[in-house]
Amino acid sequence: MAFSLPDWPWDALAPYAARARAHPQGVIDLSVGSPVDPTPAIIRESLSAATDAHSYPLTAGTPALAEAIVDWFGRRRGVGDLSVANVMPTIGSKEFIAGLALWLGLGPGDIVVQPSLAYPTYAVGAALVGATVFSSDDPVEWPESTRLIWINSPGNPDGRILSVEQLAAAVARAREIGAVIASDECYAELGWDDEFDATATPSILDPRVTAGDHASVLCVCSLSKQSNLAGYRAGFVAGSSALIGRLLAVRKHLGIVPPAPIQAAMITALGDDTHVRAQKALYRSRRDRLRPALERAGLRIEHSEGGLYLWATSGQDAWATVGHLADLGILVVPGTFYGAGTSQHVRVALTASDSAIDSAVDRLASAQF
């Protein structure tokens, strides 16, 4: 079966990156959202101690890792009814998101639902199997022939957080039409209306959503943001034991296994809340400085209740806003990368050093959109 992947959207940003780099004081890159802070020492030490990895690692993860994932969901996400049969480690989250439609056996004629503002990899996964993408946030609109539904909370790019009621309605509709529903919750620890209560950003596996029934439901998580492990490619998925078992069987055949040292590092990261709290405080401080600077310059911030981005609009064409900011040496992403109805929004990442954020604030002081 032949397939056609979408164009790589970031290529279109290259001329604006060049404009930003030409600024006399250099570029401040608020585009990609890649962590800039150090990986915590306790995690690096765990990785180092596990480098005698002479045996093949388990696709399902070590028993200790599986237990660490189960414990994390109970402690941090208010999901206390999981067992090791409900969880599985992944190589980051992107490979799982891109591969899920394939591993579930979708193909031409099947529909994959994604949010109206969507991380592009949901559509890439559909394209790999020749499925059709349907973009909608309203469960009532989801077609009867849908086989896979992606939701995302906190959302990328807009930082929108779905309520328990919204999640429950999505799960109910998925079950009504016989679809698998997968929630991308990679930014769950970064809700900004709470200090350090991840349950304020409800999970799709929350008992208030599922009523204790995980059938047809998956939750995808990552340690890239909360623990600065983007380079480790450390993620995990939880939910229906039947689906997890099916996916494990496929992944065993394909050899999709997180390396043993990474699994050891994940156990440490999942068991330690102190470094996550500290990292969230750093991002909150940067957000609290950057948001008012953007607003004073004439940009309006919408949603952005969670996650690592500010979803901003000047009321102008998104690319014009990207250009104006590039002339200040600030590189951001146009909302057009994430959906058809986002022609006036830009995504501004918080993943820059304190000094870079301060420089961005200074440069924005002279701007007016």
Image (tube, helix red, strand yellow):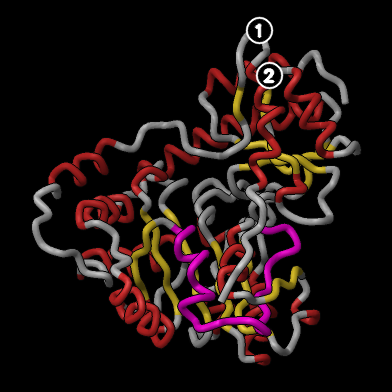
Q: Is residue 247 left or right of residue 146?
A: left
Q: Badge 2 local density, few (<14 within 10 Å), some, or many (20+)?
A: many
Residue at which label 2 appears: 329
Q: Secondary structure at mark 2?
A: loop
Q: Is residue 100 magenta?
A: yes
Camera-side residue of 315 and 18:
18
Q: Secondary structure at mark 1?
A: loop
Residue 200 percent coordinates (x, y): 57, 59
- Give residue 24's mark: 1
Residue 295 percent coordinates (x, y): 80, 30
The C terminus sits in image quarter: top right
Asked if marks 2 and 1 touch (Cβ < 8 Å), the reply is: yes
Three-letter residue code for mark 2 = Gly
Camera-side residue of 359 and 72:
359
- Give residue 239's mark: none
Q: Badge 1 local density, few (<14 within 10 Å), some, or many (20+)?
A: few
Residue 53 percent coordinates (x, y): 12, 54
Q: Is residue 210 magenta?
A: no
Farthest residue toward the front? 2
- Please state the extent of the stretch shown in magenta in the rendering: 93-118
- Look at the picture and state if 92 lies above or below 360: below
